[in-house]
Amino acid sequence: MITKKAYVAGGCFWGMEALFRVRPGILDTEVGYIGGVNDNPTYRNHPGHAEGIEITYNPDETSFKHILDYFFRIHNPTTIDRQGNDIGSSYRSAIFLQDEEEKTIVQDIIKIVNDSGRWEAEVATTLEPYTTFWAAEPEHQDYLVKNPNGYTCHFERFGTFV
C-alpha cells in the first residue's frame, strides 16, 4: 500500500490529533514540532515551532483535499497565533507544504473556505515550507486517549466545504 503524509498545525496538537486519528483513510497520527529554529525541540523548548501533527494517510481512501477540508472545520483558521485559550506562535494555524501540487490544492481550498462566508474573517493560515517534523515526547502522543477529560478547543464546527 502506498501512503502519504500531511503536516498541519491548528492550535494545541492534542485536539487536532484526537479528531484526525479516527477519520476514514487516516492510518496514523503523531504530534510534534515543526517550522521552528532549533533541532530536537521539546515541549519546554521549541522556539518558532508550531505544535503540529503528522498525518499518515491512504490516498486510495482519502485525499489531501479532504484532510484540508476537515482541518478548516475543526479549528478557527482566522485567528493569528491563537486557538481557544492558547496564545502564541506555537498555536498558529499553518500548513507545511511538501511540493507545488500541495500548494495549489491549499490555495484552492482556502478560496472555497473564504468564499463560503462561514467564518467571520478571512483565513489567516500560513503556508510554510515543510521542514523537519520532530515527534513530541511520548506523554503528548494520543494524549486525549490517555486523558479523556484533557483540554481541547477542537471540534467540528461546520459540514464539509468540498
Image: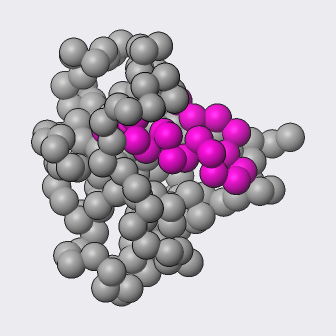
Instruction: Report if residue 19 lies within the magenta region.
Output: yes
Does residue 132 appear in the picture of this structure?
Answer: no
> Looking at the image, which is closer to me, 127 or 51?
51
Q: Give the residue displayed 23% in from the left and 36% down from the top.
A: 90
Q: Where is residue 89 in the image (x, y as percent from the top left)?
A: 18, 40
Instruction: Name the quadrant of the N terminus.
Output: top right
What range is drawn magenta here? Answer: 12-30
The reply, left or right, for residue 118 in relation to residue 98 is left
Q: Give the residue displayed 50% in from the left and 40% down from the top.
A: 18
- 159 relative to 60, above or below: below
Q: Based on the displayed image, in which of its 4 quarters is residue 41 positioned?
A: top left
Q: Where is residue 63 in the image (x, y as percent from the top left)?
A: 66, 60
> Looking at the image, which is closer to me, 115 or 48?
115
Q: Where is residue 39 in the image (x, y as percent from the top left)?
A: 33, 15
> Looking at the image, which is closer to me, 39 or 31?
31
Query: Which residue is situated farthest in the right direction here?
Result: 1
Instruction: Report if residue 46 lies within the magenta region.
Output: no
- 12 relative to 44, above or below: below
